[in-house]
Amino acid sequence: MWIVAANVLVGSLLEGMGSACEMIWDREHECMSRRNLERLQLERLKETVRRIYDRVPFYRQKMDEAGVRPSEIHSLSDVRKLPFTVKDDMRANYPFNLFAVPMKEIIRIHSSSGTTGTPTAVGYTRNDLDLWAELCARFISAAGVTSDDVAQVAFGYGLFTGGFGLHYGLEKVGAAVIPASAGNTQRHLTLMQDFGATTLVGTPSYALHLGEAVNESGIRDKIKLRWGLFGAEPWTSQMRAEIEQKLGVSATDNYGLSEVIGPGVSGECEESKDGLHVSEDHFLVEIVDPETLEPLDYGEQGELVITTLTKEACPVLRYRTRDITRLNPEPCQCGRTNARMEKVQGRTDDMLIVRGVNVFPSQVESVLLEIEGTEPHYMLVLYKEGVMDALEVWVEVSERIFSDEMKELRELEESILNRLENALGLSIKLKLVEPRTIARSEGKAKRVMDLREKTT
Amino acid sequence: MIWNPEAECMPREELEKLQGERLRETVRHCYENVPAYRKKLDDAGIKPEDIRSVEDVKHLPFTTRDDLRDNYPFGMFAVPMEDVVRVHSSSGTTGKPKVVGYTRKDIDTWAELMARTIGCGGAGKNDIIQNAYGYGLFTGGLGIHYGAEKIGATVIPISGGNTKRQIMVMQDFGSTMLACTPSYALYIADTALEMGVDVRDLPLKYGIFGAEPWTDGLRKEIEAKMAVRATDIYGLTEVIGPGVASECEVQDGLHVFDDHFLPEIINPDTLEVLPPNMPGELVFTSLTKEAFPIIRYRTRDLSMLKTDPCPCGRTHFRMGRITGRTDDMLIIRGVNVFPSQIETVLLEIEGTEPHYLIVVNRVDSLDCLEVWVEVSERFFSDEIKGLETLEKKIQHEIQNVLGITVTVKLVEPKTIERSEGKAKRVVDNRPKD
């Protein structure tokens, strides 16, 4: 505790002196020597593997099939003996079969969106929630935020982990949290002006949208924003520059996923903005070749794989994130020694991110298959409306419907639209098209037309 | 289940002494830190030392929503912003919303009071609580959330909306308590039946419902359709949010957590304090709040106070269920709406005449608002497109300002009845029992 207090003191002294000193939330763990860190990781890895093996039948079975026992983990590289975990494993064990503690110890549940396709659920014990808040406090501090700040959270609150992760982290840091939630741009502008928000939290595309709205309303010099913490979707350095210019903030990236904990896996430091510091004392990260699954070295680009080292309710072994990145173990000029991951470049699967929401073409397919009158031919068209992502779904309808009354067609349209929006958790446009409008293909059907610009 | 027996069953004599101490401290805190309160107290000729017991509350000046509006946004905060860890707000009469703040200790107090509320509702740490109150700037969602977390129950922070998913989650996660507005609870039950799911067959046992007034008739319907014990809970943003009062298993009045909030009933016209069992306007004084303390806040809610002991064992006095308002505020699906807000929106839009009618209906157990607006002659004879655009514009503006979706019905000039005196602006078709 005294380490944190000393940091606050030093931080505020230096700030008083006009120097841009940044606070390290947990110096002991964020600036460990590699040797001590690896020792800690190994200890925790052994414990976690033992615990998972003993308490979660699904993982025990997987490990037995792979022929590996907890006692065979002697070094960090032995993590490679362990089987991978994929999203489908979580779907197959919905809702609670991967929990490593009894329900009465679970005090929070988060879940993926949608009512079709199998959702996933994750749980947290009280210790897990404390850990989550701590991890978020780390990157929030790295981003420049302190207890003097007023933070406007523009993430949705609910079953998604985004809003809550940031909320509890900001609260831990002691900032004044404005739980504004997502949407209603006009209200966000009013809050920024009236409440003097100094920090904005949300998706980068929404931040850009707000930036444009701020400038169009001529209130740029009335707002007090200094820090921007953005995540939940990939964004380029050009976009960062644009956001920083439009809102007058220093913008940092942060990364996480609900299967692992939510936000809090890693985050950029405001000082370098050169890679996201990974909380390696809690997450063992690897990079693998997405085709061969062979481990890759530092500096090589591949798929990020994460093993939790301290989570109680939902520990996970070698989770394949499908996110493409690379790792940099060099200590950063900010003083932190944990490895940095490069900003996520893309995905290895067909998942799309639309306005910060994960969308799988298969979700659309599931919905359509349930509805009479539609053919199993659809296309997801992604484009930009201004700076915001937009999604239009084209659906072929059967001959009969198209030649029927307008009224029936309109009802079908409304029904499909409602079900899709519910399933995806996103508002979209829908276009019903005549049979044979959407191109057929010999091999794997092309389901997505992504017209959004790729600026790298 | 009594969450905090020491506090909730404190002998009245001890409690009233505690109230006196806390009242004096609160008045001092307000006097020293909030200019608006210092002025009010000076004008009334009262110093903090003049508060010697809880009875002295009747000498203190009142606070109204106008005070909050005049001090928007943070003028009534009693601590520096660095000590504030949360800001919430709810809609106000015209333009400015009401804004409140919380220190870390206030958040803990709030969680404690919500833990008591959830305990009153029957749940404990082994329960699975589906929180369908809206999360965000409203105090409902986060209020229930922190209380449920304090108790150690499993919290499902589902927030409002997407009813199909509410039902799926209720089945899949085995929720045992539901928290939402009473009208939404009924809507969930009815929608579930349409989906072939009978909520009575699910593990759901308890419900804590509030944010809008509801009758015993509605309670019986909910309890029959969902096989739950339906508990009325009460609160308001200006005082803390939910967590001001709650029914217990006896379901005969709501225990006001009066170690933290001092209740009074006054005659709304003469402002005199009324004795127990006399209906009047509810007034609250906070006793422990740090960031946003409040002195004799006039809620505009009509109720009465019962001082006879409750069989449950709790010694907090009970307030009767809210029977109405002293002003014209409506509550639509848990959201406060003032006709004057709608008027303000309309007056800013070109093409409308200053004649409107707000019609409130209940469709499938949910409140629906229809706004009838007279448009100028010129508009009505123009293209249909122009009318459609105007309709959408009005709907959009109302959504922006009030956060609710309404149906807009444009009518010809002179369609809406004129009146000699105060115009009748609201037609409330919702059943009274």
Image (cartoon, rainbow, N blue to C red):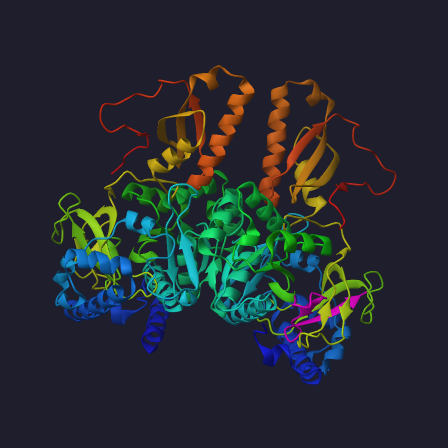
In the figure, A275 relative to B86: above or below? above
Q: Is residue B117 above or below residue A349?
A: below
Q: Is residue B247 left or right of residue B43?
A: left
Write the residue at 68% across / 30% down: B409
Seen at 80% across and 41% down, the residue is: B424
A266 on left or right of A402 = left
Instruction: Name the quadrant containing residue A383.
Output: top left
Looking at the picture, how far across and down is residue B183, in whole percent?
A: 64, 49
Q: Is residue A245 magenta?
A: no
User: Magenta stretch containing residue B259, yes or no?
Assistant: yes
Residue toward you, B169 or B332: B169
Magenta-tinted stretch:
B247-266
Res. A212 in view:
no
Q: Residue A305: horizontal and vertical position, in percent?
A: 22, 53
Quadrant assignment, res B211 = bottom right
Q: Does the image show residue B395?
A: yes
x and y percentages locating residue A62 in the rendered image = 21, 56
The residue closer to the viewer here, B59 or A15, is B59
Residue B286 coordinates in the image, percent (x, y): 65, 70
Location of the N terminus of chain B (image quadrant): bottom right
Viewer-proximal residue among B223 and B181: B223
Farthest residue toward the right?
A: B420
Between residue A403 and residue B69, name the one nearer to us. Answer: A403
